[in-house]
Amino acid sequence: MNVQTSGTIRLASIDDIPEGQGREFHVGDRYIALFRHQGQFYAMEDVCPHAGAPLTNGPLSRGTVTCMLHGWRFNLHNGVCVNLPNAPAVPTFPVTVHGYDVYVTLPPNDTGAQ
Ligand code: FES
């Protein structure tokens, strides 16, 4: 578990996240899903806004992740639900890669994301 809970935090090595998959990280009181999709990394809260299921294990396709519980699909870039436009979005977080390390930038406390 990380001690730092906001700001820019190293989450993983690029090799920790296989292409087309996600992994969950616990940072403070947040659960963060880090995905690798078509060579890019994306981070969002690992909590589906519908009924709270984790998104980490959802299939990735065309820039989206699908919640395994009821099929809501979320844009990996901005967290918007693409099959139910009025549904709440999932908070997303900026990701940067330096060398082999993947960093996420988290806002303070529970104030949401970008
Ligand atoms: S909990 Fe994710 S779609 Fe229902």
Image (cartoon, helix red, strand yellow):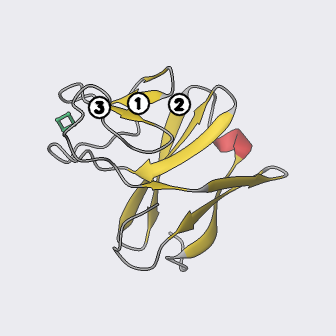
Quick check: 16 left or right of 59? right
Q: Amino acid at mark 3?
A: Cys
| Residue matched to label 1 | 65
Where disc 2 sits, the SS reads: strand
Where disc 3 sits, the SS reads: loop
Could you say where residue 81 lies in the image, as x and y percent from the top left?
30, 36
Q: Which mark is residue 21?
A: 2
Q: Quadrant of residue 66?
A: top left
Residue at image coords 17%, 27%: 70
Q: Quadrant of residue 28?
A: bottom left
Q: Please say if 75 is above or below 43.
A: above
Residue at image coords 36%, 66%: 112
Could you say where residue 69 lies in the image, as x and y percent from the top left?
20, 30
Q: Dots 1 and 3: beta carbons under 8 Å?
A: yes
Residue at image coords 25%, 29%: 72
For disc 3, the neighbor class at 10 Å (few under 14, some 14 to 19, many from 20) is many
Alpha carbon of mark 2 to alpha carbon of mark 3: how far? 13 Å
Q: How many marks?
A: 3
Quick check: 103 left or right of 7? right
Residue at image coords 65%, 25%: 38
